[in-house]
Amino acid sequence: MTETNWQQLQTDVVALLKEARRQVLAKMHQTLTVDEKTSRKDLVTNVDKGNEQFLIGGIRQLDPQAQILGEEGFGDQLTSMAGRVWIVDPIDGTMNFVKQRDNFAMMIGIYQDGVGQLGFIYDVMNDVVYAGGPVVGGVWANDQPLTAPANLALADGLIGMSAPLVIHDVAHTQAIVHASAGMRIYGSAGIEMISIMRGKTLGYISHLKPWDFAAGQVLLNTLGIRTSTIDGQPLNMLSSNLVLVATEQAQRDILRIEEDDVSL
């Protein structure tokens, strides 16, 4: 794919995700095979694995020369972001998928030499695909263009959080919550990022792996939302990060709390 038709590629990926949704919904009410990865709160199911294999198979057809990083390990072993790299999360929010059958997403991010080109977050149960990026000039929720969320200060909006970070007060998260209008927890990075795109929350802080933030970073950056480490540095696309996603003003407020070592 030397000359990329990004608009056509976006259309093709949305179609792939739609078929993946159809397959996932067909399996949802069957008996799931659920295994623990790192702990009893870090789950993987047969649906996660099967969906990743399906998505990677489709990506190989669309972009045979690309490298693919998948959460469940069915892609390639990447050591750099050179060339075209697709980053795939087949079921984001697996605990929600297992316990609620709701509030989970599928996510794909496409990068060229480390720069985000297209992102896709599929709110599966609401059947809304958030897709777009700088190469297509915007972000859409299905066919509806999204406008940039209001650039709110931390005090003026709600913030999404990872519960363990707040419980253990990692990186002054209790002070950040105290300085905001309140905390919300959705249990899925994809759903959290949709909330920010929709202007329902102004930020999100969590410890995330590349497949958790790759798609969202492309979409959010296209809409003017900042993504960084908790201390304001660029994210490492091949490793875990303590991720801060926020409006420009809220990011500035949060970094001030980090820099001042504030404890409220």
Image: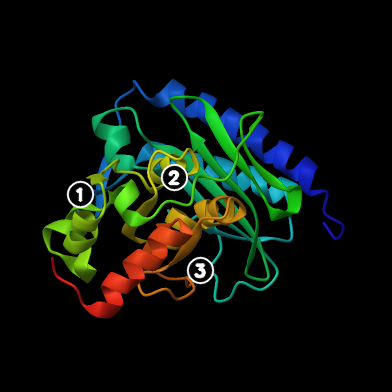
Name the mark nearer the viewer: 3 or 2: 2
Amino acid type, mark 1: Lys
Q: Earlier in the sequence, mark 1 or mark 2?
A: 1
Q: Which residue is mark 1?
A: 41
Q: Residue furthest right?
A: 3
Amino acid type, mark 2: Ile
For marks 3 and 2, give the CA distance.
21 Å
Q: Secondary structure at mark 2?
A: helix
Could you tell me residue 113's position as x and y percent?
68, 71
Q: Are marks 1 and 3 in contact (CB under 8 Å)?
A: no
Could you tell me residue 39's position as x and y percent?
19, 55
Give the residue at x 14% y 70%: 263
Could you tell me residue 149's position as x and y percent?
51, 44
Q: Which residue is mark 3?
A: 237
- Mark 3 Cα within 10 Å, few/some/many (few <14, many 20+)? some
- Above or below residue 138? Residue 245 is below
Q: Earlier in the sequence, mark 3 or mark 2?
A: 2
Q: Which residue is mark 2?
A: 196
Q: Quadrant of residue 37?
A: bottom left
Q: Give residue 192's mark.
A: none
Amino acid type, mark 3: Met
Q: Secondary structure at mark 1?
A: loop
Q: Quadrant of residue 167?
A: bottom left
Give the residue at x 62% y 41%: 131
Give the residue at x 40% y 38%: 200
